[in-house]
Image (spheres, helix red, strand yellow):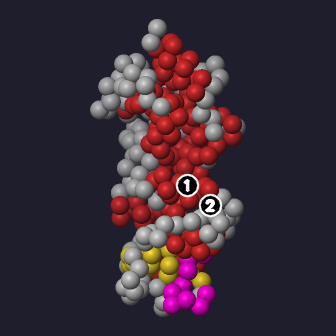
């Protein structure tokens, strides 16, 4: 079987130069063995993850000495590793800016779930331990000047922080949240819930340590990146990844200024 072109080069083929222009030194990533012909070639083993299955299911024969991974296949591959911080900025941009119009089929979703599982096994799946108290959960290397939940109250979109709706009665002081309660939220409330967490992380990790001189929008972006990768897990992290543009659009500099006024008075 011919090697299969994947990655940015494959994506650029389908989109065309008017939508995605690559610099000359961009890698040519192949699954399988493609000979060194002077280009910057990187070959990946068909035995890694479910690469061989991906090539057989999504590889297109277009008259080249290699196959080209279809847009659906590329989207499956891209989504399967968006929980990893490696080259995340590029990957999240490709996924939402250039692949938003590609609809997953049932077979795509099955393949994606399998590839995600294999990716977790191969590279690890960093995520926080939620079966502990809020105090233990937030006891990390970041020095806190204010209680995490207090900052949540300051950024709440409604009368109380949205995450409180996700706690079972009697479990309010534990970090664990209940998915059934999450599913009861409206789409707007789900996005606000992720946004509130993003604001709090941005404040604790970027704004306060830098005496509020950090660029607010950059702090929000960097915090949301952490929500999508290392600071949350499971269905909450998946939602943050899949609705990244919507959550990022909720950024409002005035909210930072309002909270700054309260915390620095």
Q: In the rendered structure, does residue 64 fall within the stretch colored magenta?
A: yes
Q: What is the x, y in percent for residue 222? A: 46, 40
Depth check: give the residue in front, 13 or 123.
13
Mark closest to the chain's N terminus, 1 or 2: 1
Which label was assigned to residue 18? none
Please say if 68 is above or below 235.
below
Depth check: give the residue in front, 227 or 41.
41
Depth check: give the residue in front, 55 or 164.
55
Outermost top residue: 265
Residue 197 seen anywhere in this rendered image of the structure = no
Q: Specify whether 187 is left or right of 87.
A: right
How crowded is the residue under tag 2: few (<14 C-alpha within 10 Å), some, or many (20+)? Answer: some
Q: Secondary structure at mark 1?
A: helix
From the image, give the main secondary structure of the stretch colored magenta: loop
Q: Specify whether 41 is left or right of 70.
A: left
The residue that appears at 42% across and 63% down in the rendered structure is: 119
Q: Secondary structure at mark 2?
A: helix
Task: State the image quarter where residue 124 is shown.
Answer: bottom left
The residue that appears at 50% across and 12% down in the rendered structure is: 262
Q: What is the x, y in percent for residue 53? A: 50, 79
Please say if 143 is above or below 58.
above
Residue 85 seen anywhere in this rendered image of the structure = yes
The residue that appears at 49% across and 37% down in the rendered structure is: 218
Task: State the image quarter where residue 191 is shown.
Answer: top right
Q: For mark 1, what is the residue?
A: 93
User: Disc 1 to disc 2, how far (Cα)?
Assistant: 7 Å
Q: What is the x, y in percent for residue 19? A: 64, 64
The region drawn magenta spans: 62-71
Q: Kindly check if marks 1 and 2 are in contact, taking CB atoms under 8 A apart as contact.
A: yes
Q: In the rendered structure, does residue 194 fall within the stretch colored magenta?
A: no
Q: For mark 2, what is the residue?
A: 98
């Amino acid at each position: 079987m011919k090697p299969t072109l994947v990655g940015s080069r494959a994506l650029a083929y389908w989109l065309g130069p008017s939508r995605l222009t690559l610099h000359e030194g961009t890698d040519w990533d192949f699954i399988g063995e493609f000979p060194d012909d002077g280009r910057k070639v990187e070959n990946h083993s068909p035995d890694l993850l479910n690469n061989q299955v991906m090539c057989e299911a999504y590889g297109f024969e277009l008259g080249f000495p290699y196959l080209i991974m279809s847009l659906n296949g590329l989207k499956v591959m891209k989504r399967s590793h968006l929980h990893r911080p490696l080259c995340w900025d590029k990957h999240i941009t490709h996924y939402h800016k250039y692949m938003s119009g590609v609809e997953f089929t049932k077979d795509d979703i099955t393949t994606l779930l399998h590839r995600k599982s294999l990716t977790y096994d191969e590279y690890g799946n960093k995520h926080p331990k939620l079966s502990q108290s809020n105090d233990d959960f937030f006891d990390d290397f970041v020095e806190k000047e204010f209680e995490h939940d207090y900052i949540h109250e300051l950024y709440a979109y409604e009368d109380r922080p949205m995450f409180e709706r996700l706690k079972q009665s009697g479990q309010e002081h534990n970090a664990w949240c209940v998915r059934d309660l999450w599913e009861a939220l409206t789409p707007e409330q789900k996005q606000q819930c992720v946004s509130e967490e993003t604001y709090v992380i941005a404040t604790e990790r970027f704004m306060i340590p830098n005496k509020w001189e950090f660029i607010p929008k950059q702090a929000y972006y960097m915090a949301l990146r952490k929500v999508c990768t290392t600071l949350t897990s499971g269905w909450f992290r998946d939602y943050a990844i899949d609705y990244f543009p919507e959550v990022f659009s909720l950024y409002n500099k005035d909210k930072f200024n309002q909270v700054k006024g309260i915390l620095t008075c």
